């Protein structure tokens, strides 16, 4: 069988094509990293805020040192590499996100405001700048100004109220934490109730349709409640941490995939709870979702008695399972296992033996 010396198998051609593609992809990635690095340096030079400029300088210095510790090229050390290096050098199992070690760009930690707070003469543009909550008081003044225009039959311009959205959704007013995120300012309950009262009163005006776009800025579409009920649940590496409350008891519940072990205050829950009702309370969400042998549960409960602790643990388990497995949310919510029970023991009344139990009456 004669074989030509110039014959090259097809698989070698395919290998050459793959190698050429890998080299091209590597060059393209290197070019992108170089462009990002130049853009970061340009942002650092163009930054006028001395605080942010100093923080950017510290961030770049820390990133270079971290790259050298990991034995990599500092110029091609991306943010993803930074996160992986910190997770390797400083491992942490803390669930609180603000307690974990991080190294982020100052623009992520200190987001820049869209509008400038000062004019060319370094004077604050907002009249409420020195109140500590300028956006809140500017909103209050804007509501008062719109109400005055509606009462005096003054025309509403596009600057006063943007065009409303045409989506046919049922809207509700923002919660306190949602309004704080929009204004980027911390509000107490008194200030939140004050601004909500004024916005609702403005929405009841006979000419409220003319400012519908302004009111929609502080409204959100109604949902099934998953965002509100599970907003405090934290998930990290497939492990969920949730808090439960019942009467005066507070429970911290950690749910992770496992074989069905349940520990309460470092004891097996069968040894910790002797009453059958308390055991059923804890097992109820697991039986309802058919996941009795799918999760390992660790609970730490303080305050109250056995009934309060079991109820708090049940709420924490339900919320953690709903966050880990969204397909179980509707079942748990339908049985009201995701809603906190605010009922408390009724206080004893004077002249009575208990809350309503009267003393035994003797005629003579």
Image (cartoon, rainbow, N blue to C red):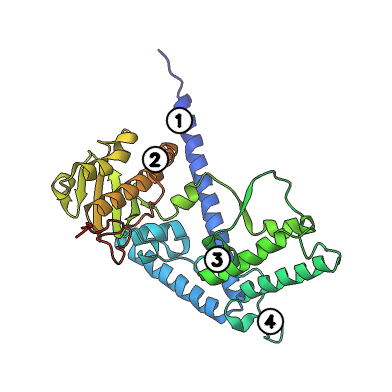
To which residue does mark 4 refer?
Answer: 127
Task: Work out whether mark 4 precedes mark 3 in sequence or the reverse, and give the earlier one.
Answer: 4
Mark positioned earlier in the residue sequence (1 or 4):
1
Question: Foreground: 82 or 243?
Answer: 243
Residue at image mark 3: 180
Query: Which is closer to the viewer, label 1 or label 4?
Result: 4
Secondary-structure class at tag 1:
helix
Disc 2: which residue: 325
Q: How far apart are marks 2 and 1 (CA)?
A: 48 Å
In the displayed structure, does residue 103 sit left or right of residue 211? left
Q: What element carries label 2?
A: loop
Sequence-wise, the earlier of marks 3 and 1 is: 1
Between the C-alphas of marks 4 and 3, the distance is 20 Å
Callouts 2 and 4 close, C-beta under 8 Å: no
Q: Say which quadrant the N terminus sits in.
A: top left
Sequence-wise, which precedes: disc 2 or disc 1? 1
């Amino acid at each position: 069988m004669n074989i030509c010396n110039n014959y090259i198998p097809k698989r070698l051609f395919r290998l050459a094509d793959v190698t050429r593609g890998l080299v091209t992809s590597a060059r393209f990635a290197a070019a992108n990293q170089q462009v990002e690095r130049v853009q970061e340096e340009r942002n650092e030079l163009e930054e006028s805020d001395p605080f942010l400029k100093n923080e950017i300088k510290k961030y770049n210095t820390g990133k270079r040192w971290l790259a050298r510790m990991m034995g990599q090229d500092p110029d091609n050390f991306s943010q993803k590499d930074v996160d992986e290096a910190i997770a390797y050098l400083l491992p942490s199992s803390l669930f609180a996100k603000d307690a974990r070690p991080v190294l982020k760009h100052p623009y992520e930690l200190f987001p820049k405001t869209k509008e400038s707070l000062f004019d060319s003469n370094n004077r604050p543009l907002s009249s409420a700048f020195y109140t500590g909550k300028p956006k809140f008081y500017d909103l209050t003044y804007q509501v008062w100004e719109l109400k005055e225009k509606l009462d005096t039959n003054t025309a509403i311009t596009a600057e006063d109220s943007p065009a409303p959205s045409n989506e046919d959704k049922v809207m509700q007013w923002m919660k306190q934490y949602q309004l704080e995120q929009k204004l980027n300012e911390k509000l107490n309950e008194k200030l939140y109730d004050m601004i909500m009262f004024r916005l609702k009163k403005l929405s009841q005006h006979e000419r409220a349709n003319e400012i519908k776009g302004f009111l929609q800025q502080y409204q959100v579409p109604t949902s099934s409640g998953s965002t509100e009920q599970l907003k405090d649940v934290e998930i990290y590496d497939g492990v969920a941490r949730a808090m439960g409350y019942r009467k005066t008891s507070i429970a911290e519940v950690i749910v992770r995939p496992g074989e069905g072990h349940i520990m309460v205050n470092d004891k097996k829950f069968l040894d910790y709870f002797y009453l059958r009702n308390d055991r059923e309370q804890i097992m109820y969400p697991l039986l309802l979702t058919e996941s009795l042998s799918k999760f390992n549960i660790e609970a730490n409960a303080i305050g109250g008695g056995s009934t309060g602790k079991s109820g708090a643990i049940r709420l924490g388990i339900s919320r953690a399972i709903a966050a880990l497995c969204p397909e179980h949310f509707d079942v748990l919510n339908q049985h009201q296992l995701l809603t906190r029970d605010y009922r408390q023991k009724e206080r004893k009344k004077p002249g009575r033996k208990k809350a309503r139990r009267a003393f035994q009456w003797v005629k003579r």
